[in-house]
Image: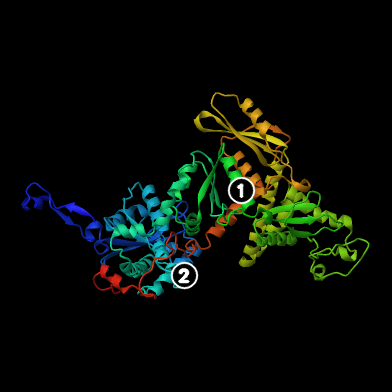
């Protein structure tokens, strides 16, 4: 029960000098939603990120208590050409915004329209991110306004049985919105208003009547999870690895942090919203901590523990043995095959690839460039056969018929060997030329497919060369500035971290290295394979390439092949940019609740369930 002093009225009570207390009503415990002014805003932009894109249109609707109080709409000159695919999506062209004001002139009017209101947007980080960036660029202070994300709210209140996803285009017809989303700012803002009101109808039966309760809806903490905060009591601070263990002492989840205690404690607060992690915490019985010398050791130990125990709630790197490689076989007429194991002396290996689709894309790209045979049988120069259709198409030299000798075929395979080892130009140049020809012939879809295959191939060659450059070094010592003026030390052998430690400020680094070597592991792999996993070697590479890292000692040669894939960096950047710009407005986030309970529901099912909730939005629905 919440009791508050009644103020001056207490002086009129019979008991003079004593304050009179009254029980507070529900409305006094927060700001009633019916009295809150909301400004629902939507933007159209030239791209998906405020770092390299600009606003082209702002639309906003001001509502309170279910009644529309005003609308705001204006085109904005972005100061650059609007990409054609954006014009197709939104209908806004460069000609339309040529005479529109710039964002610096629009912001004061919009902020005045939204003054004192709670901002609402569908996928609020996108719209508010652009507005905040525009304010920063225009030296306009951003107001400290509360915000509501209708996409997040929908995920809390709707089930997958009701809607397949939480896109605005899906929610608007579900809530019978009077305006359909059209990728124009004001239309989308109007549709979001109807979605907001439809979601509010779900709140009444749940007892959520105030703005404070609405804000806390997406940050609910399960009481059972809160009661487990004691599991973090014995966890130390500093870098390391933590392991959540279940009822049978089995590892449920392995993670790493630069501050173990702070990270583990965060699992028992509202900051942790992932549903699978919430489920994991409910099962956890204890948390083990493994302090580490520095962040690289922590990351490596996490990787090894995940690979060893395969915790059910870890998704990354659980099965490193499932990585795929493209192998050029070692035989008189070599061919390409996709394998899971790298064996020295068994041919040339390219990769690794995350999945079969990527591996097949690389194989297809190589076959586009080189007339390697695609049959799966083993060929002998002494046993002749019949040619397949690929020979008639010029895609194979037909060594099976004797039309191509072992030496002639070896010259073709040597192009791939050279590409993997050092120089990919002879392999990639025909492919990039074909992409240009397809684009010139306006066969854009075929050009895009081949371009993406080439990008997969380039990344694979780059990754293989980077891994090889470190995995062939018998031993090297790396040092990075550590805490309190000391040094973080890593001893690496053939790409594997075999020892880690710290040298305190003022102490001898050489003495610390002697201790590391005395306790270092011996990286021996089965059948002479690389002792380090691909992921571990890449962790070491990233740590080594950070600014400030120093190479203290090296046994062997640490060098990158020349020319390598450096000349294709711009090509890869353009491919990534093109993929990101295909649909920057797509909401690909899964429809799932983000904290326990898994679903907040009340009243009978159906799109208009919870009619009692309309009491918090008095007045008729706006008509347009």
Residue 477 as seen in the image, left or right of residue 133: right
Which class describes the residues within 10 Å of circle 1: few (<14), some (14-19), or many (20+)? some
Corner quadrant of residue 183:
bottom left
Q: CA distance from mark 1 to mark 2?
A: 34 Å
Q: State whether residue 77 appears in this view.
A: no
Q: Residue furthest front?
A: 248
Expressed as whole percent of the image width and height from the top left, the position of residue 401 reads 89, 66
Expressed as whole percent of the image width and height from the top left, the position of residue 213 reads 31, 59
Q: Earlier in the sequence, mark 1 or mark 2?
A: 2
State the scheme by which the image is colored.
rainbow
Q: State whether residue 417 appears in this view.
A: yes
- 78 or 593, which lies in front? 593
Q: Is residue 181 above or below residue 504?
A: below
Corner quadrant of residue 358:
bottom right
Residue at left 72%, top 60%? 363
Residue 550 as seen in the image, left or right of residue 390: left
Expressed as whole percent of the image width and height from the top left, the position of residue 187 reads 37, 69
Question: Which residue in the protein does label 1 denote?
Answer: 305
Number of numbered labels in the structure image: 2
Q: Is residue 251 above or below residue 361?
A: above
Residue at left 36%, top 67%? 192
- 264 or 547, which lies in front? 264
Q: Say if mark 1 contacts mark 2, CB within 8 Å.
A: no
Q: Secondary structure at mark 2?
A: loop
Q: Is residue 217 above or below residue 505?
A: below
Expressed as whole percent of the image width and height from the top left, the position of residue 240 reads 54, 41
Image quadrant for the N terminus? Answer: bottom left
Residue at left 43%, top 59%? 595
Which class describes the residues within 10 Å of circle 2: few (<14), some (14-19), or many (20+)? few
Question: Which residue in the protein does label 2 denote?
Answer: 160
Residue at left 65%, top 46%? 566
Query: From the viewer's perspective, is the residue at label 1 or at label 2 nearer?
Result: 1
């Amino acid at each position: 029960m919440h009791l508050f002093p009644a103020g001056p009225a207490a002086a009129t009570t019979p008991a003079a000098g004593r304050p009179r207390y009254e029980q507070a009503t529900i409305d006094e415990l927060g700001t009633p939603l019916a009295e809150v002014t909301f400004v629902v805003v939507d933007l159209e932009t030239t791209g998906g990120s405020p770092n390299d894109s600009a606003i082209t249109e702002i639309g906003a609707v001001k509502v309170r208590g279910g009644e529309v109080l005003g609308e705001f709409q204006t085109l904005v000159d972005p100061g650059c050409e609007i990409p054609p695919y954006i014009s197709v999506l939104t209908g806004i062209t460069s000609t339309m915004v040529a005479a529109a004001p710039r964002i610096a002139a629009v912001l004061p009017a919009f902020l005045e329209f939204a003054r004192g209101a709670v901002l609402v947007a569908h996928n609020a980080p996108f719209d508010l991110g652009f507005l905040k960036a525009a304010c920063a660029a225009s030296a306009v202070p951003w107001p400290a306004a509360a915000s509501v994300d209708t996409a997040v709210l929908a995920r809390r209140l709707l089930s997958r049985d009701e809607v397949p996803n939480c896109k605005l285009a899906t929610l608007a017809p579900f809530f019978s919105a009077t305006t359909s989303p059209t990728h124009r700012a004001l239309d989308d803002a109007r549709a979001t208003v109807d979605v907001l009101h439809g979601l509010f109808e779900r709140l009444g039966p749940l007892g959520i009547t105030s703005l404070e309760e609405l804000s806390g809806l997406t940050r609910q903490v399960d009481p059972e999870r809160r009661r487990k905060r004691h599991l973090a009591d014995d966890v130390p601070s500093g870098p390391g690895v933590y392991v959540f263990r279940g009822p049978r002492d089995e590892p449920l989840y392995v993670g790493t942090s630069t501050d173990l205690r702070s990270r583990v404690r965060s699992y028992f607060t509202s900051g942790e919203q992932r549903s699978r992690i919430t489920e994991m915490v409910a099962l956890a019985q204890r948390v083990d901590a493994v302090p580490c010398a520095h962040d690289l050791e922590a990351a490596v130990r996490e990787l090894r523990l995940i690979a060893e125990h395969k915790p059910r709630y870890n998704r990354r790197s659980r099965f490193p043995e499932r990585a795929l490689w493209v192998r050029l076989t070692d035989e008189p007429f070599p061919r390409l095959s996709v394998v899971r194991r790298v064996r020295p002396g068994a041919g040339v290996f390219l990769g690794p690839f995350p999945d079969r689709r990527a591996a097949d894309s690389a194989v297809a790209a190589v076959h586009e460039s080189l007339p390697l045979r695609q049959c799966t049988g083993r060929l002998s120069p002494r046993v002749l056969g019949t040619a397949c259709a690929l020979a008639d198409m010029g895609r194979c030299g037909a060594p099976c018929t004797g039309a191509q000798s072992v030496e002639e075929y070896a010259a073709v395979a040597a192009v791939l060997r050279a590409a993997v080892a050092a120089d990919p130009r002879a392999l990639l140049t025909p492919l990039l030329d074909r992409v240009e020809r397809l684009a010139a012939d306006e066969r854009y879809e075929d050009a895009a497919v081949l371009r993406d295959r080439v990008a997969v191939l380039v990344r694979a060659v780059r990754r293989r060369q980077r891994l090889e450059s470190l995995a062939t070094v018998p031993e090297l010592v790396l040092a990075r500035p550590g805490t309190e003026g000391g040094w973080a030390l890593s001893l690496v052998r053939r790409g594997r971290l075999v020892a880690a430690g710290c040298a305190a400020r003022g102490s001898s680094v050489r003495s610390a290295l002697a201790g590391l070597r005395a306790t270092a592991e011996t990286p021996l792999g089965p059948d002479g394979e690389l002792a380090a996993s691909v992921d571990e070697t890449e962790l070491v590479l990233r740590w080594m390439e950070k600014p400030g890292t120093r190479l203290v000692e090296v046994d062997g040669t640490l060098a990158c092949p020349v020319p390598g894939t450096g000349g294709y960096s711009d090509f890869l950047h353009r491919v990534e940019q093109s993929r990101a710009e295909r649909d920057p407005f797509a909401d690909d986030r899964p429809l799932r609740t983000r904290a326990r309970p898994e679903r907040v529901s009340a009243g009978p099912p159906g799109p208009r369930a919870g009619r009692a909730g309309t009491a918090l939005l008095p007045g008729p629905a706006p008509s347009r």
